[in-house]
């Protein structure tokens, strides 16, 4: 086969039968990613090509099965095998390194935790019933199960959420123009990475973080007593579904309107009551339509159905929730490939 023929073959889409066979083995790719992350392969592989024997010694694995693992991942562009049999990094495999500023290692682990292998086979049951399968599997709701029965998985969840929040906070701060505002409140804002990034961007801005007590106890060190931003920061323990005892010019609600309709309704009602006429409310969510990341967001949408009975929003469903709550939507724009911002106002 000539070079031109080889190139043509490499860029020709596989026939449907081949593609479907690949897709039904999607679990193999996920498992291989998890194995590589847990072994620390990406961390052991430096900037130079490395023989499998040396890589195996570094991660305390057997060379032959490690080569099989790396060969499988290289089919997806995760690591690359050279003609001499050594392996090198690719742009994607570097994201499995713990020290990469854009690392997705903890997120890769979270999406492949042991409980996920229990719930995915029951997706048909969830589709039939419209409710989560975790309670039938484990006898309790998802987060109590995670914290009480799977503490290691809970730790992975916390690390993954921190990673995701830190990375998206930079994009949100760059995206939002708060130059005319004096105060901002991050509602259900976790450890407060978004509000911290905004306070760093706007030196005169005052900030508030509201989330559950056990969450804000671990707030970003910059926001806590003695931190660089503490003098402009108020940390309020509370449940946004119950009440929002916070007054601000701008309220940010990021990725917390996906659990259930009742929680969404109560949270939006409370933020409208707290902000009052003219308050700006910025809702930031992953969407399952009109986004470059649909394969990721629709997968997360199905996982939400399985574990908590929640759902990611479409543009239309998000608009419906916000307008039904009484907000006026001024603008809808993408923050990055994974997030959209709904910029709203509480009307007079």
Image: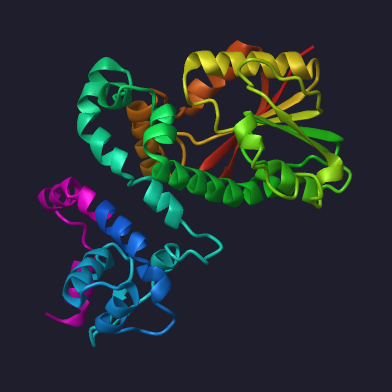
Q: Is residue 288 visible?
A: no
Q: Position of residue 92 (x, y in %)?
A: 40, 64
Q: Is residue 114 visible?
A: yes
Is 99 on the left-hand or right-hand side of 4?
right
Q: Is residue 320 magenta?
A: no
Q: Residue at x 24, y 36 (%)?
A: 118
User: Where, quadrant-wise, is the C terminus in this rendering?
Assistant: top right
Q: Nearer the viewer, residue 102 or 325?
A: 102
Quadrant of res 289: top left
**What colour scheme was applied to this rendering of the protein?**
rainbow
Q: Residue at x 41, y 39 (%)?
A: 297
Most common secondary structure along the magenta stretch: helix
The outermost residue toward the bottom is 84
User: Where, quadrant-wise, is the N terminus in this rendering?
Assistant: bottom left
Is 219 on the left-hand or right-hand side of 301?
right
Q: Is residue 44 shown above or below 29? A: below
Label tally: 0
Is 312 on the left-hand or right-hand side of 23?
right
Is 338 on the left-hand or right-hand side of 213?
left
| Residue interval drawn in magenta | 1-29
Quadrant of res 230: top right
Q: Position of residue 52 (x, y in %)?
A: 26, 80
Q: Nearer the viewer, residue 76 or 247?
A: 247
Q: Residue at x 83, y 34 (%)?
A: 183
């Amino acid at each position: 086969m000539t070079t031109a023929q080889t190139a043509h073959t490499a860029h020709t889409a596989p026939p449907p039968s081949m593609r479907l066979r690949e897709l039904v083995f999607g679990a193999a790719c996920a498992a291989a990613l998890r194995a590589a992350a847990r072994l620390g392969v990406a961390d052991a592989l430096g900037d130079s090509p490395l023989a499998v024997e040396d890589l195996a010694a570094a991660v305390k694995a057997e060379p032959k099965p490690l080569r099989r693992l790396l060969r499988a991942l290289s089919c997806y562009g995760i690591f690359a095998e050279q003609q001499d049999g050594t392996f090198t990094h690719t742009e994607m495999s570097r994201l499995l390194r713990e020290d990469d500023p854009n690392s997705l290692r903890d997120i890769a682990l979270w999406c492949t935790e042991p409980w996920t292998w229990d719930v995915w086979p029951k997706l048909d049951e969830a589709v039939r019933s419209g409710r989560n399968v975790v309670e039938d599997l484990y006898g309790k709701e998802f987060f109590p199960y995670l914290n009480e029965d799977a503490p290691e998985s809970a730790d992975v969840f916390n690390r993954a959420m921190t990673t995701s929040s830190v990375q998206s906070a930079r994009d949100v701060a760059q995206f939002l123009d708060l130059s005319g505002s004096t105060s901002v409140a991050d509602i259900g804002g976790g450890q407060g990475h978004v509000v911290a990034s905004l306070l760093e961007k706007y030196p005169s801005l005052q900030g508030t973080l509201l989330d559950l007590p056990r969450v804000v106890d671990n707030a970003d060190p910059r926001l806590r007593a003695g931190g660089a931003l503490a003098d402009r920061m108020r940390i309020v323990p509370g449940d946004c579904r119950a009440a929002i005892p916070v007054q601000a010019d701008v309220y940010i609600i990021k990725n917390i309107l996906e659990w259930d309709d009742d929680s969404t309704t109560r949270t939006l009602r409370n933020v409208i009551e707290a902000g009052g006429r003219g308050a700006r409310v910025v809702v930031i969510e992953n969407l399952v339509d009109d986004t470059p990341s649909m394969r990721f967001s629709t997968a997360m949408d199905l996982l939400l159905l399985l574990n908590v009975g929640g759902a990611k929003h479409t543009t239309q469903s998000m608009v419906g929730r916000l307008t039904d709550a009484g907000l006026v939507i001024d603008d809808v724009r993408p923050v990055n490939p994974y997030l959209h911002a709904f910029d709203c106002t509480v009307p007079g």
